[in-house]
Amino acid sequence: MLVVHRAESATVLADALAELLATPLDDPFATELVAVPARGVERWLAQRLAHRLGASGSQDGVCAGVEFPSPYRLLTRATATVAPEQTEALQAWTPERLVWPLLRAVDDAVTEDWARVLRRHLYLEGQPVPSQSTGRRLSLAASVARLFHSYARNRPQMLRRWAAGHPVLPDGGPLGTYELWQHLLWNRLREELGTSPVDLQAEVCDVVRRRPDDLDVPRRVSVFGASRLSRVDLDVMAALAEHREVHLWLHHASPALWEHVAGSGPVVRRADDNTGTSLGNPLLASLSRDLRELQHLLGAHVPDHADVHHPSGRAGSDLLSRLREDLALDRVPADPPALDPADRSVQVHACHGRTRQVEVLREVVVGLLADDPTLEPRDVLVMCPDVEAFAPLLAAAFATRGEEAGSTDGTHPAARLRVRVADRALHQANPLLAVLDRLLDLGTARLTATEVLDLAGHPAVARRFGFDDDELERLRDWTAASGTRWGLHEGHRAGWSLQRVPDGTWRRGIDRILLGAAVDPGQGMEAATLGGLVPLDDVDSSDIDLAGRFAELLDRLDAAHAGMAVARTPEAWADLLEEAVLQLAAHEADGAWQELQLRDVLLEALVEGAEGDEDGASTGVGSGAGTAADRPGASLSLVECDRCCEVPWPGGRPRPGSAPAR
């Protein structure tokens, strides 16, 4: 049975989950499965459960025997054992795996009349010749793959009618002229893969209902904190709920909103949903769209679900409590009470920059902990718009030492707090991935003096070539003295139509440095120039080794840059990038795992093309559609390769949206 739990407070919801988990499963060795939408939610929930579960029943500080997969992984695990073939075939329709067959389908169809919209987008003046290409093949394939994936998960009836030869919209209306290509391209893709995701998903649900004993999940599973679930997710959960306890835990701010949506009629299109416009509280209307749509889906596809409301208790008199109560009751007070000057439940701090924001945050958190003995550090959650930009500032601010702190030992109280940052990028933990990230950026860059010296100063690169801080400073002096500005050599400058200007390139600069190391300054004026070059006179005999190592770095960078200038298959790109990174960077003595992770990331991004997870975490499931390297027309340029590598990395590029820091 599917049970929907809802509460206005996440704390109340977590406590109700703990009460449910306090009753153990029949198998003492079985693991509880609680799906969560993000790692930050997992950390907070695990901490909360640790103070409600345990041998004594509370405050044991242990949360064991509980796994926190994503909702996608939970449902995939539930179906993989009973319907392995269908689950494997569905992997071919995940967005990143779908890119490769889409590239082939687009390349094959681009000259046909129905694909003229695609042709105008991919080629200048609509002429399908390589010289007119706009370089949008991969970005187009990735966008269409996500679009088709969304159709399969949320509009299966529309795809069924497409398969039957009816190009219609979800509401049954005909597709417009500029959308007709989607119907034809999807059918061609379905024929190539030999399956339809809609039919596969229906087969999966049917097998789950018929073979409950083969399900690889315990008798009780939970999905906590999800605000959006697709129709496919709910169909699988409904099939699973026929033989298992499935608990859906929703952080829902308003019982009044729940009753309001429950009393409205069924909704097919978002444009037909007027429940938001009929709400009285404008804040509730603007923040509740996802939850309203989820409730509509629950009513349409799981109408027999049980509904359990967990009250959050009596509201207080401060501003935050009144705001929560207004949201819960869907009201806007006609005459709101005056704000108490001492009320600090909602605070807005105006700061002039990120550093100042973090400094004010530190003082506010320390003050709150000092003023409220019941408040503990684990109760504090900080949301950041860009966690990579704020993470180093948080680490520095909460490790402050100095007399201004007001403590007897000169240590700021914040230094004793344990701050953990969730959802960090992979390249923050693996320097080889950071070098890969930088190398891809340099592939289309001018390679200025600053860019190359910054690369040389990266810890992994400096480790490979043995550069220390003094030597890096020496390299900076040589670069300035040799007149190096940008460009590896004349050939590199050809992209900017400056191939006849060799002065200021890295090749000219390193030649001057090496001549300075080889020529004795005491040879007189006859040694002033050699081959039209003036030796750099600031290079001593003791600098020969450093000059050689720097020349080796530039030579390897030149080789990598030349390799990246040629279009190649995804498998060849993975080999090239792995070799280039390992030629330029080295891991620490105990970091052999970093090479393995580098290879795994490249294989997932370029060869397997498997996303495998709805929240951005890749699973590396075997390719149901074959590797990209096996597919004709899958040759990628550097720009397309860089775009391809952006997708599977949980933090390969700064990701928009909030990320929690604890």
Image (spheres, rainbow, N blue to C red):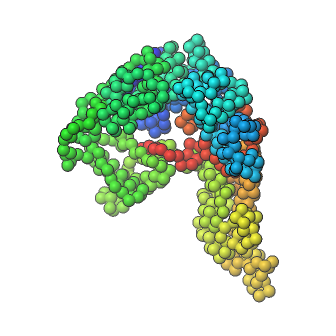
Q: Residue furthest bottom?
A: 525
Q: Which residue appears at 64% of the width and 47% of the height? A: 643
Question: Can you give x and y, in whole percent of width and height, for residue 646 in the image?
Answer: 61, 46
Does residue 650 sit above or below 235 in this rendering?
Answer: below
Q: Is residue 278 left or right of residue 182?
A: left
For the C terminus, the image quarter is top left
Question: Can you give x and y, in whole percent of width and height, for residue 601 in the image?
Answer: 64, 42
Q: Quadrant of residue 46?
A: top left
Q: Is residue 523 left or right of residue 25?
A: right
Q: Is residue 67 visible?
A: no
Tell which of 589 and 290 is nearer to you: 290
Does residue 637 sit above or below 485 in this rendering?
Answer: above
Q: Quadrant of residue 477?
A: bottom right
Q: Is residue 256 left or right of residue 112?
A: left
Question: Can you give x and y, in whole percent of width and height, for residue 209 in the image?
Answer: 56, 13
Q: Which residue appears at 27% of the width and 29% of the height? A: 313
